Amino acid sequence: MSLIQNSCSSADIVNGLQESGLCRGDLVYLQVADAAFRAMDGPLSDVELYESLLNAIREVIGQEGTLYVPAFSLSFARNEVFDPEHTPAIAGEWNTSVGFSEYIRRQPGAVRSGDPNFSVCGLGHQAEGMLGDLPAMTYGPGCFYERLMRAGGKICCVGGGVQHTSFLHYAEETLGVPFRYKKLFTGSIGREGETRKQRWISSVPIQAESGITDGTRVASIAMQEGRLRIAAGCACEIATIACDSFYELLRREIAKDPWITAQGPAGDPIALEDRPRTATQSRVRLPENASMTELISGLWKLPRDIVSDGYDVALEALSTQAPMVIHEYPSGTECWTWLVPEKWTCREAFLETVDGQRLFAYEHSPLHVVSYSLPVDRVVSRQELFRHLHVHPELPDAIPFIFKYYERDWGLCCSQKLKASLTEDQYRVVIRSTSSYGTLKVGEIIARGNSAETFVLCAHLCHPAMVNDDLAGVVVGLKVMQELLKRSDLHYTYRFLILPETIGSIAYLSHNEQLIPQMMGGLFLEMLGLNQPHALQLSFAGDTEVDRCLTRVLQDHDPRGWTGAFRTVVGNDERQFNAPGVRVPMLSLSRVQKSEPGKHPYYPEYHSSHDTPEFASPDRLADSRDLVLKMIDAVEGNAIPVNRFKGEIFCSRYGINVDAYTDREGNRALFDVLFLIDGTRSEAEIARICNLPVDSVRRLLEELRRLDLIEFRGASRN
């Protein structure tokens, strides 16, 4: 900073601070503009200027007061390690005088918060109490700004107004403005030579000019109402406002106009962000009532990342095949303990030699880039490249599917053979990707029955350029729903959810909690085109009516089929339905072998470029569809037979006797069933105990009802 001319004495600064409303014992969050120092006494060195301002503040607030300044580093946003002791503050609209912040940070006794993006430094007896042990979020409940407001703190701006104070962002987040959203940042914190991973949630604006913070209008209102006090006799403008008064003003004005603290104009945040961009994916048109083969052929190559244009295009195409409601959950939406991530777009990516020889590119396969990779465009050493270059552990010719949805890193993927050919010292890496505000989408198809009790089918549509995981489950579920929609005699209601893995289920469940008590069970569908036996993974409880019912149908339908306990066969969205606080007994149906030591637990092509349509046989998909429909039929008819007779039935009188001499096993089976009919066991449970096909038990029960010997309780038995 150059030397400055005499204009504003230290005494003027003291008087100005007092005139603006600061007094002894205050907790003050101070933001200083470079203009303030240009108006102060000179010629002085930078350090002397900072010392002069600090002394003036200390004179006003006294030993009882505490000073706080922004010491923002954006470390995690810049993919850098954050060391609270050594990482310097950087300049920005919130900290134009980075030198003063650095001066405060280096003061003896200074305390710095652990926020890896937007840390704050404090000097005074309440520095540690306000900045220590903060929750891992910049603006949420219990954050520094909330603590400051609750403690009666003030905001003071020297050399400029409050229109860019970071307290605005705290109010914007808590009051829910449409142009900011929560984002999870990940990285490493360094302390005393050691680093540890850390997660931090910050509020970020949409990436459009409309979303740029501009507190000019609210500052003007605050001044008109006498909330914001400006020192009149000081050459460097000093303005102060109490945090609680400012927050109440913001609450009132944002309720009137949610865009009042932004540059504007108001508009749909997604449309504003997408306006400068061209669509990365064109629409896919599917034939009417497309076959499962046509569905897979039309959709499998799309880059269907969890929140992306490719996923949206696929879901829109599927919505033409059956009546579908599409639920949208914007980026940053709280979903129980989760946050909806940003939309990820990759426009171009490639690896090439330094002299420009292209080795592979995203346009050839979306699997060449780690899903949700950070952008990069630079020449890297072979050693660094290999730290970020992933290969499939078992298939030498395959490109692996690698994702880092909630990590901040970059990465590429290729075959083992290609990686082995990389022998040069340096390579050029280009990944032109963006993360932006978007909406996670869940498609829902409903076949309504006479009862509000609901059976949930579920499959995930994400995973780019792959088929069995889990486009196969999507197309099987769609065909099942098309059949159910033709029926007019359903007892239960059936919901089919098409969603991004894990976060899709959590988003849907957390925003539809009122539906959870109605969910009597469900079935996740996955990997159903493979040439392997059906595997049924039981629910968390494992012994519900749905478990017993579906298990029996599998045994009847697929002699090679097998069952496994919860979380022992596959792991997918059934976890979210079975999780604590939800406990919907959702099972999982897939085609996988029982795992053996040394063998892949699912199938060799899992999570790779080899998971193509040729590994999803139409016959196997159709067989899985038929099995699911049989399971639904069993659920529909799984009533509890209640005896209207007493004693052992005189079977010969009713023509249902099986002669024990000519058919001993049939006679035993008949009486095994009859002796279990007492109003306490369902049809499926009776079939399980007697080790009989569900259809055989059902036929006998229907005959007994026709003879008026039993009645049913529970599911419909038309």
Image (cartoon, helix red, strand yellow):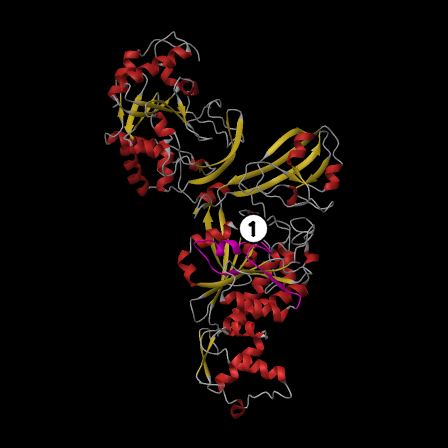
Q: Which image quarter: residue 623?
A: bottom right
Viewed as shown, does residue 681 lie left or right of 122? right
Q: Is residue 473 above or below residue 174?
A: below
Q: Is residue 69 above or below residue 460?
A: above
Give the x, y percent position of residue 146.
34, 35
**Magenta span contains residue 568:** yes
Give the x, y percent position of residue 111.
40, 24
Q: Is residue 298 above or below residue 240?
A: below
> Which residue reaches farthest top?
43
Give the x, y percent position of residue 209.
45, 35
Given residues 159 and 536, the one toward you in this image is 536
Q: Main secondary structure of the magenta part?
A: loop
Any part of residue 346 in sight: yes
Mark 1: secondary structure: helix
Q: Is residue 482 above or below residue 124?
A: below
Location of the N terminus by quadrant is top left
Give the x, y percent position of residue 293.
65, 61
> Which residue reaches farthest bottom?
653
Q: Mark 1: few, some, or many residues within 10 Å (few <14, many ≥20)?
A: many
Q: Which residue is mark 1?
A: 311
Given residues 342 and 65, the one toward you in this image is 65
Viewed as shown, does residue 25 lie left or right of 464? left
Q: Which image quarter: residue 355?
A: top right
Task: Name the kind of residue labelled 1 in the image.
Answer: Tyr
Determine the residue positioned at 58% across, 78% down: 696
**Magenta span contains residue 270:** no
Viewed as shown, does residue 324 lie left or right of 56? right
Any part of residue 163 in sight: no
> What is the span of residues highlighted in magenta in the rendered image?
559-586
The total of numbered circles placed on residues is 1
Given residues 459 and 714, the one toward you in this image is 714
